[in-house]
Image: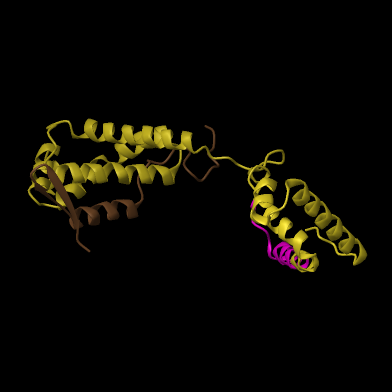
Amino acid sequence: MAKLYSKKKLATQKMLPKKETISFLLNYSKALSIAKVGKLSFEFIAN
Amino acid sequence: MANQELSDAILIRKYIEGEESALGILIERHKSKIYGFIYSKINDRDLCDDVFQDTFIKVIKTLKSNAYNEEGKFVPWVMRIAHNLVIDHFRKSKKMRFQRDTDEYSVFSFLSDSSLNVENQIILDQVELDLSRIIDELPADQREVLVMRIHQDLSFKEIADLTGVSINTALGRMRYAIMNLRKVIEKNNIILTN
């Protein structure tokens, strides 16, 4: 049986977004509120 | 733990009703599939993150404004948003093509800063000062024609009318003015070049 000398796995790692990106999205979602007045919609971002 | 088993449709409903944690579960559940989809089109991790973020910003805005109506098809819907954003990205990058400098090609051979550097500005100021001093030394009638022609950009007919002389006289005065300027410049070895 052939020996494996490489330490790293050759298979590509699972592609995942950065933690910061997900954290931003969750915080953005918490901060965002949308109000609809007639045909207009207003976005509010809470600081 | 129980939340992990809830269907996408229920999580979306909960999110619309105000349960923020439902979004976290949805992102966690589908991030790999959606990110992989984007990465298959754009082979750049940073750009992928940007598109992924923009995709979910659209998702959040749509859900929060109660405009979502594709029950049971959450992932295909998100994929479609991502796909459209990828197309937008390629459109933009096509319009603003990235050009890398090579040995044969440099963007700076086409673009140049037309404004003068400090040294050239000082030289130009000096040349203008010298020239205005020499012009001041000219006889009044010649100076008048020269200033009207060069600085005020008047035609010889207009100069003739304004000074009350014939066009030929105005032309003659201009000619003498230039000859006199040349004489003074040569005599005093004045360099009037930038």
Q: Is residue B78 above or below residue B153?
A: above
Magenta stretch encompasses residue B21: no
Q: Position of residue B77 (x, y in %)?
A: 22, 32
Residue B54 placement, left or right of A7: left
The quarter of the displayed image where residue B124 is located: bottom right
Is there any visible trace of residue B93 in the rendered image?
A: yes
Which residue is farthest right? B187
> What's the residue at 33%, 51% (across, down)?
A21
In depth, the one of B166 and B173 nearer the eye is: B166
Residue B75 placement, left or right of B168: left
| Chain letter matching colour brown | A
The quarter of the displayed image where residue B140 is located: bottom right
> What's the residue at 17%, 31% (across, down)?
B73
In depth, the one of B100 and B2 nearer the eye is: B100
Residue B94 placement, left or right of B24: right
> What's the residue at 23%, 57% (across, down)?
A27
Q: Position of residue B78 (x, y in %)?
A: 24, 36
Q: Main secondary structure of the magenta part?
A: helix
Q: How many marks?
A: 0
Q: Position of residue B24 (x, y in %)?
A: 20, 49
In depth, the one of B67 and B1 nearer the eye is: B67
Is there any visible trace of residue B4 in the rendered image?
A: no
> What's the residue at 75%, 61% (across, down)?
B141
| Bounds of the magenta segment | B113-130
Q: Colour of chain B?
A: yellow
Q: Position of residue A32 (x, y in %)?
A: 19, 54
Magenta stretch encompasses residue B121: yes
Quadrant the C terminus of chain A occupies = bottom left
